[in-house]
Amino acid sequence: MINLAIVILLSYIVGSIPTSIMLSRWVHGFDIRTKGSGNAGGTNVFRVLGWKSGVLVMLVDIGKGVLATTVMARLFWDPTLPFYNRTPFDDFTIIQMICGGAAIIGHIWTIFAGFRGGKGIATGAGMLIGIAPTEFAISVGVFLIVFMAWKYVSLSSISAALAFPLSLFIRHDIFGDEIHSYKTLIYFSIAVALLLVYSHRANIKRLIEGTEHPMRLPQPERERLGA
């Protein structure tokens, strides 16, 4: 049980690394949460600091999810669960999901920045890459389609999050594809999707009210930084 607690804690700490806040403070001298939408995520970095910084932050945040579900789960986990597994769920997939979920929670509620982080989409994407790359690719496709149609990153992210468990269900239960650890993946992916939807609750309210801002091309450097 102690070993499992250590793995969860390490995954949470990895997820808590506030990439966007560190970049904005160290390079530009301000907290990204004081600009733009006030969110510490890659999308806000893209809007405020430009696409290069935005892509860098997103890649690092994705890496946190991959690191938690692959390196943390494989290197620090004892191959036996600290309790008798009475469920039909696959042991190692459970550990991967727990590690990935801890990283997402760390990203949303980071211990290094007053528990005010990002929305968890990029870190959640990294978790999915490490566990189910096929469904991740489908979710990316859904994200791109929705974004090209409506230009809202929040709506695209929510759609992609919901597409993951839906694609699992369609592949396994409708088309009959054999998916390793399906019973573990389907339930946990639903939980993660709901968590990510919850983290976008303010965006959902703005979408309903028609006040959500679509993604636009970055403005010139001086205007973005209020110079």
Image (cartoon, rainbow, N blue to C red):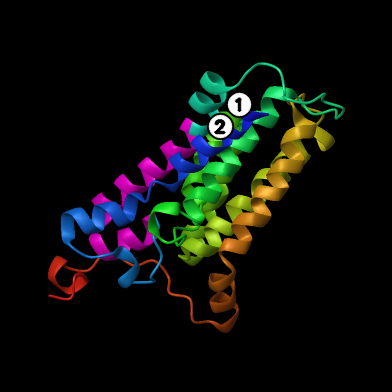
Residues marked 2 and 1 touching at CB (< 8 Å): yes
The residue beneath circle 1 is 3
x and y, in percent, of residue 92 in the image: 67, 23
The residue beneath circle 2 is 6
The answer to if 55 sits in the magenta stretch is yes
Left or right, residue 24 beside residue 5: left
Q: From where the camera sits, is residue 152 visible?
A: yes
Q: Please, what secondary structure does the residue beneath circle 2 have?
A: helix
Q: Could you tell me which quadrant the N terminus lies in?
A: top right
**Residue at the image point whose x is 53% and y is 58% from the top:** 156
Q: Main secondary structure of the magenta part?
A: helix
Residue flagged by tag 2: what amino acid is it? Ile
Residue flagged by tag 1: what amino acid is it? Asn
Q: Please, what secondary structure does the residue beneath circle 1 have?
A: helix
Residue 209 sits above or below residue 104 on the image: below
* Crowding near the residue tagged with mark 1, few <14, some 14–19, many ≥20 C-alpha atoms within 10 Å: few
Q: Nearer the viewer, residue 183 or 140?
A: 183
In the image, the segment drawn in magenta is: 42-67
x and y, in percent, of residue 207 in the image: 56, 75
Residue 147 sits above or below residue 203 on the image: above
Q: Could you tell me which quadrant the C terminus lies in?
A: bottom left
Q: From where the camera sits, is residue 180 visible?
A: no
